[in-house]
Amino acid sequence: MVLNWIFDSSKEQQEEEPNGHPQNNGLLKEQVEEESNGHPQNSELLKEQVEEESNGHPQNNGDNSKQLTMNAEHFSHNQDKPHKETLPTLDANYREVSSLSVIDFELDGADWLNNINQQAQQRMVDGLHQIRKSLQADRVLVYGFNPDGSGEVLAESVDARWSKAGSSFDLDYNLTEDNCKPYYVVNDVSTKGFALCFREALEAIEGKAYIVVPIKYNDQLLGLLSAYHNATPRNWQESELKLMLNAAAQFRIPLQQTAFIRNSQFQQQQRDKAVKQERALGKMLEQIRNAKEDERIFQIATYEGRKLLQADRLAVYRFDEDWGGRFIAESVGAGWSKLIDTVLVVNDTFLQENQGGRYKHGECFAVDDIYGVGHQACHIALLEQFEARAYAIAPIFIGDMAADKKLWGLLGVYQNSGCRKWQKDEIELLRQLGLQIGIGIQQNQQFAELEKTVFRQKSVAQMVARMQKSVSVENALEIAAQETRKLLDVERSSIYRFNADWSGENVVEAPFDKEFKALQESCFQTTFGQNTYPDLQKNQGGSYQNGHFDESINL
């Protein structure tokens, strides 16, 4: 082994196979796995020598076939020497902190764990400095995974010319125990067909070339050891990959030592987040239930929902009769345009042709990156108009949640600033929010109908009281016609009286103004005269004799 600096070195450790991969020539004659969609693809980068030429950095032939030539500002090796010589004191440097005997067992449990964590953290930082110096790389870091597949940079050594990696890879959920390869070597990231999300993450840390080695223990993926060259592409050498493979094996123990505290903190954060979300959602749903106007429901749902989801936009979209639609409410972060002002009508042909598509079946839909899921060009253009890079959609139904339910609209959450890996709890929160918006709308409709019914009943009672006080039948009928027109909010109300032969005439009518009344009288007399409805005379009142109600009469 090149790096035995975690625990006391021994012959037995030196013969250990890092990551389960024996250090022999056969390993490095295998193909170097390169990333695809933010992760590796196959490529014959390393055999006996590195054969690939990358952006004007050819490998020299002949006696100097293993020569490592880099940008002159950095360094130039005439021989690809084993890196063991550059790390002669790693064992000694870490011998005194590598044994559990240095731990003060009199400390209480929390201090004991913190002490282990701090020592492991320091060992990782010191080790990364030496690896970077040996490789003459611009950045070397250790990335640790969380229980949900996300992760964070745990330790980093970076040249002063470059900024720290920060949170660039915190939400990269693509690499798992099932799909990770033994190592990834990329000489020039610009020549690879990486997914846009991954290219952006690499651009954030200014990486032009890299070696990444998974850190595993008993087939469990603990983290990654990564080395980056930023200034130019770089033809990585066989000995450099060997060094990284050896070093990755040595990082298993500090990763395990820090895992307990990291996982405990992560789980506590998840519990705190869940409690916070549950309380906020409960408060928000209570406000929605108490809102008497739809606009207030939308305002609460979009503003509070966007805060909970920590997104750039949360918007309510309503379908029209033709299954087109428009945004009617939204909450949007600073720096982004308002869709209700800029996108007045949305003609999504797929939703129109399929009358709501998957959403009419109650499905939710989430996209982490609009450029990575095979959307058609017209769909991408529409989403770009929304300024969206990632989004998730939930349906809004009104009516009985069984056979009678109607797809009223959609609730969409949008991440504009970059791609985003949507989590199950976030999609569930969005679904619940869409469900409650629908319930709120339906309750308001029912409440409005109830108010209207109560108002009409009260108005009818008042009308009857006025009619009873009338001095004549004609006056009572006029009151009835006028009040009925007002209650029903129609242009004309009339009372038709049958004669003995079932002919008849309008004895009272209440148009909404005098001009309209004159027009109605003229048309009425010219067309029908006295016998206004001949069919009623022929059928002696028709179905009205039995008290039936009809919404229209075919004139």
Image: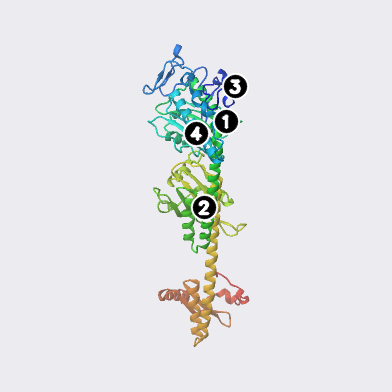
Which residue in the protein does label 3 denote? 12
Q: Which residue is mark 4?
A: 121
Q: Nearer the viewer, mark 2 or mark 1?
A: 1
**Which quarter of the figure is the N terminus placed in?**
top right
Counting residues from the N terminus, which is met first, the one under dot 3 or under dot 1?
3
The residue tagged 2 is: 410
Q: Earlier in the sequence, mark 3 or mark 2?
A: 3
**Horizontal and vertical percent position of residue 144:** 52, 35
Instruction: Determine whether label 4 and label 2 are within 8 Å by CB.
Output: no
Distance CA(mark 4)–CA(mark 2): 47 Å
**Which amino acid, mark 4?**
Gln
Indicate the position of residue 240 as horizontal and vertical percent values.
Answer: 48, 22
- Residue with the mark numbered 1: 216
Which kind of residue does numbered mark 1 sit on?
Answer: Lys
Q: Give the foreground label among 1 and 4.
A: 4
- Distance between the alpha carbons at the discs numbered 3 and 2: 62 Å
Asked whether residue 354 is in view, the answer is no
Residue type at mark 3?
Glu
Q: Residue furthest bottom?
A: 471
Closest to the camera, between mark 3 and mark 2, is 3
Inter-mark Cα distance, 3 to 1: 19 Å
Q: State the SS at label 3.
A: helix
Q: CA distance from mark 3 to mark 4?
A: 25 Å
Label 3 vs label 1, nearer the camera? 3
Q: Nearer the viewer, mark 4 or mark 2?
A: 4
